[in-house]
Image: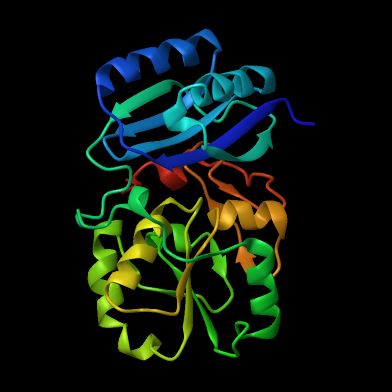
Amino acid sequence: MKPILNIAAYLFVSLDELPALRSKMLDECNARELKGTILLTGEGINMFLAGKEDALRGFLDWLRSDTRFETLEAKESWSEQQPFKKMLIKLKAEIIRMNHPSIRPEEGRANFIKPKKLQEWLDRGTDDLGRPVVMLDTRNAFEVDYGTFENALHFNIQKFTEFPEAIIAHKEELADKTVVSFCTGGIRCEKSGLFMREIGMEHSYQLEGGILKYFEEVGSAHYQGACFVFDQREALEPNLDSIPFEESSRKNIKVS
């Protein structure tokens, strides 16, 4: 077992008094020598953290002792070295910016499909009703370049705020398909899935847990390449091992 546990986790839940919450979380993370990034917003939490297993699991236990976070789930992977340089907790307006206030995942999720069920659909090429399945990559263009599902549709967007306009432009051509949206860990699809339902795309789903959960439960089936991650591992292979990090390859990247 590699010595460093890495987790990616998010939860849409109403939060208030963010500066005080940030201070408490930062104290807990520093006391456990954890590193990574936590985003706190009025709509919830998103985090990428790494550290020794006992320390990181202890932090998750502490966090879940707050009833607001008790349902938080984490995707796990392991690394030889700490992939983060520091511990940051940032206050933001949205966990993932979409600029559509009507989309509120806390109030109800879009339909989702679990990784192993998705594999069944992709093996067959159709859903359980015989409709053709289209995989829709909601990530930014540079992330898609690292790897994606076979024959996946993507819109070459540079930031997630471009997604609503892009999917509206392609809505009619997808009308007779079952569309499964996916992203790194599932957070963008919490919003993209709801938006597709809002614009009348009834046969749309989101991949539960994103690519990382798919790697964990299924592996490489129907996926080509690696998955970009938001730390110095750069990207993960379907076996959840990292590819070599090159500082020059990401120095100009801005994630949004």
Quadrant in which residue 53 is drawn: top right
Which quarter of the picture shows residue 153?
bottom left
Q: Is residue 20 left or right of residue 142?
A: left
Q: Residue at x 33, y 19 (%)?
A: 21
- Pick the front one: 187 or 159: 187
Q: Position of residue 89 (x, y in %)?
A: 36, 24
Whole-percent x, y for residue 143 in the image: 45, 57
Corner quadrant of residue 171:
bottom left
Above or below 45: residue 141: below
Q: Position of residue 101 (x, y in %)?
A: 19, 53
Where is 242 relative to 196, above or below? above
Along the line of sight, the residue nearer the viewer: 15 or 159:
15
Task: Indicate how the structure is coloured in the image.
Answer: rainbow
Quarter containing the N terminus: top right
Most foreground residue, 104 or 94: 104
User: Hey, which residue is sitting farthest right in the picture?
Assistant: 1
Residue depicted at 70% across the width and 75% down the height: 120
Q: Residue at x 65, y 30 (%)?
A: 5
- Judge whether residue 54 can be spotted in this image: yes
Q: Nearer the viewer, residue 57 or 198?
A: 198
* Residue 177 versus residue 70 in the image, above or below: below
Q: Is residue 110 above or below residue 174?
A: above
Q: Is residue 242 left or right of residue 39?
A: right
Report the side of 167 relative to 121 (left or right): left
Percent coordinates x, y for residue 106 in the rendering: 36, 48
Q: Is residue 222 visible?
A: no
| Total labels drawn | 0
